[in-house]
Image (tube, rainbow, N blue to C red):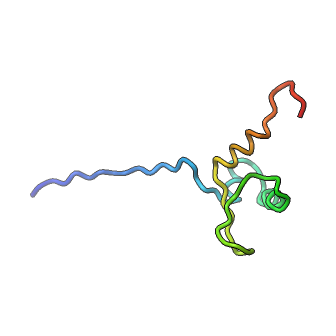
Amino acid sequence: MASRKTTHVRWEVTDALLSPRQVGEIYGFSAGTLANWRWTGTGPDYIKTSPGKGGRIRYKRSAIEAWLDERTVSGGQAA
């Protein structure tokens, strides 16, 4: 019997989609704070999977990082 060579493919997610809970666990923002930021339009960009209250919210990790980078103040600069 011929032997089979098995190839394993490893998928890497470079721009993971995160739930508000996951964002909170990683970055320390509460789900309520994220909801307030969505309401006021001041938070990071997000994805809503469907219209209305039933749509799930997801954040691209890159959108969170970009949003944080925009708010990073270098030492000695006025905030």
Query: On the image, which quarter does residue 35 sit in?
Result: bottom right
Q: Residue at x 41, y 50 (%)?
A: 10
Q: Position of residue 65 (x, y in %)?
A: 68, 44
Q: Quadrant of the C terminus?
A: top right
Residue 27 position, x and y percent, is 72, 47
Q: Relative to 31, say whether 9 is above or below.
A: above
Q: Where's the N terminus, which quadrant?
A: bottom left
Find the residue positioned furthest to the left.
Answer: 1
Q: Would residue 51 be found to the left or right of residue 8 on screen?
A: right
x 19%, y 54%: residue: 4
Which residue is drawn at the image coordinates 80% and 28% (left, top)? 74
- Relative side of 71 to 55, left or right: right
Residue 51, image x and y in percent? 70, 73
For this orientation, the residue located farthest to the top is: 76
Pinpoint residue 63: horizontal percent, then vertical percent. Answer: 68, 49
Specify the quadrant of the image occupied by residue 53: bottom right
- Name the residue rendered at 70%, 43% in the picture: 66
- Number of callouts: 0
Seen in the picture, residue 18 relative to 56 is either above or below; the reply is: above
Q: Nearer the viewer, residue 59 or 45?
A: 45
